[in-house]
């Protein structure tokens, strides 16, 4: 898993539920979430045709590059976008809305 907010953090291997809490403590949050750095990391490191799951509220601070990066990610990998926030997004991939 690659935690991200306004930047990408070092990858973390999830082995137990407590690992998720460690990740949450390290994230800054508070808006201004920019996915570009995390997407670039995945594009550079992931094996082609990997399943890539993006967990986000999708209240993103888009740059000029954001949509292009999501399109490139979807072209090279199976992209699944999961949100507990927004009801839809304007990015390629399979979108899943988690209800409260």
Image (spheres, rainbow, N blue to C red):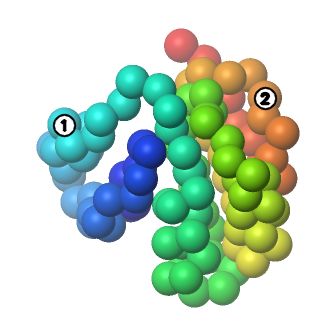
The answer to which image quadrant residue 24 occupies is: top left
Q: Give the distance between the C-alpha atoms of the residues marked 1 and 2, in whole angstroms.
A: 27 Å
Instruction: Say whether residue 47 is left or right of residue 20.
Output: right
Instruction: Say whether residue 23 is left or right of residue 43.
Output: left
**What residue is drawn where x is 53% and y is 13%?**
100
Badge 1 crowding class, 10 Å Cα cut-off, few under 14, some 14 to 19, many 20 or more, is few
Q: Position of residue 73 (x, y in %)?
A: 71, 68
Q: Nearer the viewer, residue 62 or 48?
A: 62
**What residue is drawn where x is 19% and y is 49%?**
19
Q: Position of residue 69 (x, y in %)?
A: 72, 63
Q: Nearer the viewer, residue 23 or 80?
A: 23
Residue under label 2: 88
Q: Residue furthest bottom?
A: 47
Instruction: Say whether residue 2 is left or right of residue 61.
Output: left
Residue 83 in sight: no
Residue under label 1: 25
Q: Nearer the viewer, residue 88 or 98?
A: 88
**Secondary structure under the numbered disc 1 in the rendered image:** helix
Badge 2 crowding class, 10 Å Cα cut-off, few under 14, some 14 to 19, many 20 or more, is few
Residue 20 in sight: yes
């Amino acid at each position: 898993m690659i935690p991200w907010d306004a930047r990408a953090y070092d990858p973390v291997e999830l082995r137990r539920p407590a690992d998720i809490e460690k990740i949450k403590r390290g994230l800054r949050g508070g808006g201004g979430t920019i996915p570009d750095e995390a997407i670039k990391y995945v594009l550079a490191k992931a094996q082609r045709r990997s399943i890539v799951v993006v967990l986000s509220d999708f209240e993103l601070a888009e740059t000029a590059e954001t949509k292009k990066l999501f399109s490139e990610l979807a072209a090279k990998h199976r992209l699944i976008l999961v949100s507990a926030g927004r009801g839809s997004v304007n990015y390629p991939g399979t979108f899943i809305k988690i209800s409260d």
